[in-house]
Amino acid sequence: MDYKYLEIAKKIEEQISSSIIKVGEKLPSLRMMSKSFAVSIGTVEQAYGYLEDKELIHSKNRSGYYVLAPLDFSIDSPMESNFESKPQEIKILDLSMQVMSKTQENTPYPLGSAIPDIESRAVKQIHSALRRHAVYIPNHYEGPQGNLDLRRQISKRSLLGGKIYKPEEIIITSGCQESLTIALQVCTGPGDLVAIESPGYYGLLQSLEVLGRRVLEIPVCPDRGMDLDQLESLLQRHNVSALVLNPAYSNPTGHCYSDEHKSQFCHIVSRLDIPLIEDDVFAELGHGFNRPKTIFSFDHQGRVLLCSSFSKSLSQDLRVGWLVPGRYFLKARDYKYASTLGTSSLQQWALADFLQGKQYERHLQSVSINYGKKLCLFKEMIKELFPKETKMTQPKGGYLSWIKLPGSLDSLRLYDLALQQGISITPGRLFSVSPRFNNYIRLNFASLPPEKMHRALTELACLISQAS
Ligand SMILES: Cc1ncc(COP(=O)(O)O)c(C=O)c1O
């Protein structure tokens, strides 16, 4: 194995930390470095790539590599605050509907939506696949399990998550939201208590509220995740029917669990004999890292129900997702059949077609690098424009940032003010049943080109100082 690139990277790292190369300075060109170290240009590229992953440098519009400002944005852990987990009723739907309906109007600065870059080449390729397939209208329903070719393609990709699931184990859904809702329906009942992450994805709270379940919110520390001892003791103390986790680049914190943590989750739910619903929807969007393994891959008892979709990696508008419900398969298929008969054929054909080639893999590689770079720029802008006390998580994948604003600023008020200026944000209030995250906001750091992002954040920073 050639570690020459690491040697070069370490030398540059030393020079950056001792300020021989200063923040904002341009690094020597690839050609110059390759000459002075007598290595190939590819080796220097690898060294620079390594430093980019460590967020020490970034490349700017092909003009070269520059040293980034050191960032010290660790966020206060919600675990360190007084956060007592107790069973609670959910009342989030009205608020979330209000936010959703106001945000639905096209805003020039859509920082509030958790959607990918829909201008990508891959989305255009899918649209042409849709047009190609639109000439044929089937004279039957596709069926509750969904298109076999698409399930074969999804099954092929499953190995990347650490364990293959077969086409016959998969149910195609109309998005991850439907996968989650079916999963909750098959393994919990009305009035049941479901353990979830806090802060956590508000769509999950909505489903739980509509289904009449209660929640036990478990604190999640943005850099360490859930404390396993605390989790187990809470699950033992309360009569919980299921645990729901979003372990890979979670919404909103961007946190990713280690394999050790994932295997422990499986042991815990096995000891307590409860199911675990895994929301894996952001997993393919690591910033230059391998796709994380699923919790599903550590489970040997069929008690993990895996939920995912193409909404975050390709387009939310496809409305195609999947569910691998393990031992709950038959019941889940019945629920899917009873609720929609089956997901629309056209989207499934187009996706199956698209996934056959190499376009999806190429697309994932390019967006992941792009999101990683956009995150570096975004952090620099936050540091430059937002109040000094602002804190922000360090996501290693996806495109969501979880930001804590200074003092007791009300993010719902900021949301209204921002919307008047054409900027959408997601108020932290939505991510818990309690007002615990009122002074947080979630922003999509990849939804705009850098200049537009700078304009939006400048305006937002002004509104923050007005509202503080
Ligand atoms: C964590 C998480 N799970 C599920 C969903 C829903 O995904 P879909 O659009 O595929 O229904 C979202 C959408 O924002 C999400 O963030």
Image (cartoon, grey):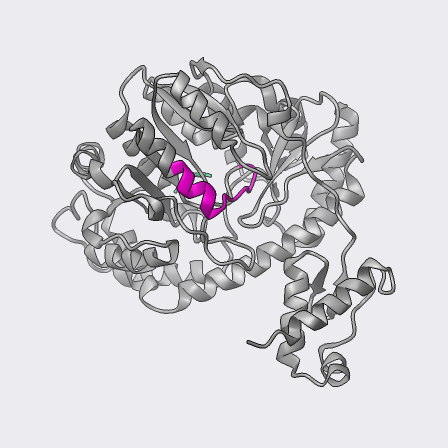
Quarter assignment of residue 419? top right
Left or right: 389 in relation to 158: right
In this rendering, is residue 127 above or below 85?
A: below
Quarter assignment of residue 184? top left
Determine the residue positioned at 16% across, 45% down: 143
Left or right: 101 in relation to 408: left
Residue 332 % position (x, y): 21, 35
Q: How many marks?
A: 0
In the rendered image, the quadrant that contains the N terminus is bottom right
Residue 269 % position (x, y): 35, 32
- Out of 177 and 271, give the one closest to the viewer: 271
- Out of 235 and 368, give the one closest to the viewer: 235
Determine the residue positioned at 21% across, 42% down: 342
Residue 216 % position (x, y): 44, 20
Left or right: 288 in relation to 206: right
Residue 44 % position (x, y): 67, 75
Ligand 1 quadrant? top left
Q: Residue furthest right?
A: 20
Q: Is residue 410 magenta?
A: no
Do we see residue 422 in this rendering? yes
In this rendering, is residue 389 above or below 140?
A: above
Quarter assignment of residue 182? top left
Q: Is residue 253 magenta?
A: yes
Q: What range is drawn magenta here?
A: 252-265
In the rendered image, the quadrant that contains the C terminus is top right
In this rendering, is residue 67 above or below 337?
A: below
In this rendering, is residue 462 above or below 371?
A: above
